[in-house]
Structures are given as C-alpha cells and as structure tokens.
Image (spheres, grey):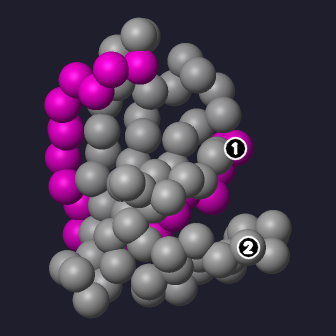
Amino acid sequence: ALEEYSDHIIIGGERLNKPFVEKPVDRRDRNIYVYFAKDSGGGRALVSTRESGDVDCIFRFEASSRVRHEGSFVYQEYT
C-alpha cells in the first residue's frame, strides 16, 4: 500500500522523500513524473523520454503533487 504525504511517500514500508521520480512499469508508457515537496513549491513535472530512454523535454508543470493511483509504478530518489 502507498501512503502519501506533502513531503514524502511510504511504499512497502520504506519512506521516500520528495523530490522523487515515478516511472511506469510498462516501458511503452513514457510519462515519467518528478514530484516536489510542498516546502519547495510543490507540484509535479511531466517528463517525456524517447525510446532510447534519453530525456526529450519537460512537457508541463502541474500544481498538484498527488501521485498516480491507477497503474503500476517504480519510485526512485530524484538525483
């Protein structure tokens, strides 16, 4: 189960602080989001990738920082 807070998520009992990256498990879905903590402005950025995995561009920034709940995702620290 996923627990969501303004500055982190808890998934599988592990805490992951924002900013973090959310990648779809389905590699054909190239909608990757970077989530930011509320104290640093919050929101999320949608990043597009090419088939090679290289970042193409950031399509848009959204004020909402809620993680997606439909689908399967991998969460990683943003570095």
Please say whether residue 33 is one of the residues in the magenta stretch: no
User: Which label is found at residue 72?
Assistant: 1
Residue at 24% from the left image edge and 60% from the top image edge: 62
Question: Disc 2 marks which amino acid?
Answer: Glu
Circle 2: is it few (<14), some (14-19), or many (20+) Cα within 10 Å?
A: few
Q: Which residue shows up at 39% across the image and 49% down it?
A: 33
Mark 2 — residue?
A: 14
- Position of 75 compared to 41: left or right? right
Q: CA distance from mark 2 to mark 1?
A: 17 Å
Pointers 2 and 1 in contact (C-beta within 8 Å): no
Report the front residue among 31 and 9.
Answer: 9
Which circle's residue, 2 or 1, is located before the other in the chain? 2
* Residue 11, image x, y percentages: 73, 68
Residue at coordinates 42% horizontally, 10% vertically from top-left?
Answer: 51
Residue 48 in the image, given as x and y percentages of width and height: 31, 30
Q: Which residues are magenta?
A: 53-72
